[in-house]
Amino acid sequence: MRREWQHPAVARWMRVHYGWVILAASFATLGVMYGTTYAFPVFFVALVQEFGWSRASTASIFSLNMMVAGLSAPLVGHLVDRYGPRRVLPWGAVLLGSGLLLSAATGSLWHLWLAFGLVDALGGGILGPVAHTTLLSNWFIRSRGSAIGIAFAGMGAGLFVFSPLAQAAMDRVGWRGAFIVLGLVSLALLLPLTVLCQRDRPEELGLGPDGGWEPPPPSKIPAGRAAGAGEGPSLTTALRSPGFWGFVSCFFFTPVSMMSVTTHQVAHLVDLGFGKMTAVHVLGTVGMLSSVGRVMFAILSDRIGRVWTALLSYACSALGILVLMLLTPAAGVGWLYLFALLFGIAFGARGPIVSAMTADTYRGRHYGTIFGLIHLSNGMGAAVGPWLGGALYDATGSYRLAFGVAMGSVGLACLSLWLAGGPRAGR
C-alpha cells in the first residue's frame, strides 16, 4: 500500500507541520464543543422567563450536563486507551449535535434533562479534555504544557464565538431556533474535524513527538497506545498515591467556583439592570480572555513551574469574583469588563496546567483511564456549582452568598493543588 507521506517533500512538510494540524483540530473541536455547551447561560434567562422555573431548577439542567460529562470521563478514558481517540471522537460529534437539536423540541424540564443534560452531555464528555489530553500527550512531550494550553484555549474561543451567536439567533428565531442553529453548526463543523483531521500518534505517519522524524514502529503496537510511552504507573499504583487524590480534589473545587459564577453571571447582570446583550458580551469577553489566559498560563507553567502558575491564576479568579460580588446597579460598564479581565484571563487556565501535571506523573498505557477517573471529579464539581448558585439565590434573593462560596472554593482548590504537586511540581 502506497503511503503518500513517504514522498520526501510530503515527509518534510509533515515532520514540521502535522503536529500543528493535530493541535489545530483539537483547538477547534474543543471550541465548538465548549462554545455550544457553555452557551447555556444565554438560554438560562429565556428559559426562566418562558416556563417560570426556579433558578435552581433551571440551573439543574446545566448541572446534570456537567455531571453526566464527568461520569462518562472514566469510560471515555478506557475507550481512548483501547481504541484510540480517532475512533472515539466522531461519536461525540453525533451525540452533541443531536442533543442540541432535541433541546429545541422541549416542553418541560425533564425534556431538557434528557436532551441537554444527557445526550448533549455524553457527546461533550467524549469530545472533552480526556481524549484530547491523551492525544496531545502522544504528539508533544517537551512542550506538553504549552500544547495542551493552546488546544484548551479553543474552549474560551468557542465561548467568545457561540455566546453572541446564540443570543443573536435567539433574538431572531427564539430560543428553540437558537438550539437548532447551534446543533446544525456543531454537526457541520465537528464531524469533519473528528473524522478527517485526527491521528492517534505520530508513529502512524512515521513521525516522532514534538515534530521529530522517526521510522514507523512495529504494527503490533495497539491503536490507542503511543510508542515509547512505556507502561507507566498502573491504575492501582495511581489510586494509592496521595497526589492522585489531591488532583481529584482540585478538579472538584475548581469548577464548583467557576461554574457557579459562569452559569449565573448573565442573570446577575440582568438583575442589576444591564441589558441582555451587554451581559452576553461580557460572557463572550470572558471566553475570549480565557483563550489568551490558557495559552499564557500554560506557557508560563513550562517556564516557572505548574503549581506556582496555577496559584497565580487562582488569585486572578478570586479577585474577579470579588468584583462581581460587589457590583451595584450604579456601577459603570467599566467594572463589568474589569471583572471580565480578572475572571476571564484565569477562567479555564488550570485545565491545561493540571492536565499537564497529571500527564507528567501518570503518562503510560493506563493514562487515559487514570486521567478519566481524575476528571470525573471535575464533572461532579461542575454539576454542584450551577445548582448551588441557583439554590442560594432562591434562598436569599441575591447572588452575594453564592459568589462568596465560589471564592471559598477557589481557596480549597489552591490547597488541593499544593498537596498534589507542592513546590516541586515545576515539571
Image: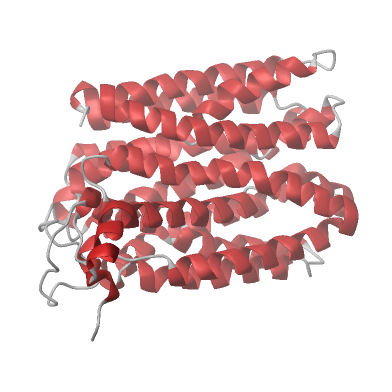
- Image position of 415 (left or right of 407): left
Q: Which colour scheme is used?
A: secondary structure
Q: Which residue is drawn at 16% across and 46% down?
A: 240
Compared across the picture, whether 96 is left or right of 284 comes to left
**Which quadrant of the figure has residue 423?**
top left
Residue shown at 61% from the left, 17% from the top? 322
The residue at the far bottom in this view is: 1
Q: Which residue lies furthest to the front in this view?
A: 9
Residue 56 x/y as whole percent: 71, 44
In the displayed structure, would residue 264 be above or below residue 4? above
Q: In which quarter of the image is the C terminus?
A: top left
Please state the horizontal and vertical placement of residue 308, each as a whole percent of the image. Answer: 31, 21
Quarter of image, res 234: bottom left
Q: Say whether residue 80 is left or right of residue 320.
A: left
Residue 53 seen in this snapshot: no
In this view of the protein, which residue sits in the foreground, 364 or 396?
364
Q: Residue at x 20, y 51 (%)?
A: 363
Q: Is residue 335 visible?
A: yes
| Total residue callouts | 0
Q: Where is residue 153? Give x, y as percent.
A: 48, 41
Expressed as whole percent of the image width and height from the top left, the position of residue 232 reads 12, 53
The N terminus lies in which quarter of the figure?
Answer: bottom left
**Residue at 53% over, 65% down:** 123
